[in-house]
Image (cartoon, grey):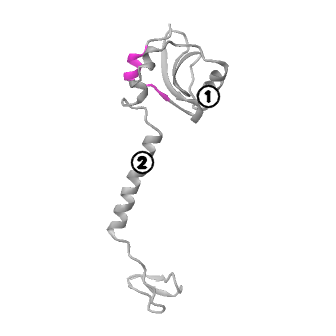
Amino acid sequence: MALTHCPECSKEISSNAKSCPHCGYQPKSTGCFTYIFYIILAFFALYILSLIFPSNSSGSTVINDSRTFEQSWRSPSNDELVSISRLMVQKNIKGCGEYHIKEIENGEFVIACSANGENWVYYVAWPNIGEIYLASLEMERKLKPPY
């Protein structure tokens, strides 16, 4: 049995006491329903976050969007070049001496990056929110190099 302090009157009481013998304070017990509620709340929050920030998995809309594979590659405009380059530097992506892009939706890009013009690495980027991901193997197999 350890001694603790009552949160109400600050006098010493037994840690096993159901109430404070000095002031009558009774701590509220936390039942299992409270813990279950918090677990359900955590799963709900994760679900909402997954809708807001989709992962780069095989179920990604970029992989299923026909524009990703049907559009032609193009050189980025000056503004796109600055924002994409800044993002790549920020995320420590190296070896992109040359790159071409496809804009799938407003602010969502597929990027083909090469150091030598022969070996290409593909990324999916959202410069407006500061996110860039390496393309999945499935997407990489479907994409054709810019030239």
Q: Report how many numbered discs are placed on residues in the image.
A: 2
Task: Decide: few, some or many residues near mark 2? Use Cα within 10 Å; few <14, some 14-19, many ≥20.
Answer: few
- Tell me the residue that label 1 is attached to: 89
User: Which amino acid type corresponds to the residue marked 1 in the rendered image?
Assistant: Val
Q: Which of 48 and 15 is in front in this view?
A: 48
Q: Position of residue 13 (x, y in %)?
A: 45, 86
Q: Where is residue 115 in the image (x, y as percent from the top left)?
A: 56, 14
User: Which amino acid type corresponds to the residue marked 2 in the rendered image?
Assistant: Leu
Q: Earlier in the sequence, mark 1 or mark 2?
A: 2
| Segment tinted magenta in the rendering | 133-143
107 above or below 78?
Answer: below
- The residue at the point 49 percent across, 87 percent down is 12
27 above or below 62?
Answer: below
- Tell me the residue that label 2 is attached to: 46
Q: Position of residue 22 (x, y in %)?
A: 48, 92
- The residue at the point 40 percent across, 22 percent down is 139
Q: Nearer the viewer, residue 105 or 27?
A: 105
36 above or below 53?
Answer: below
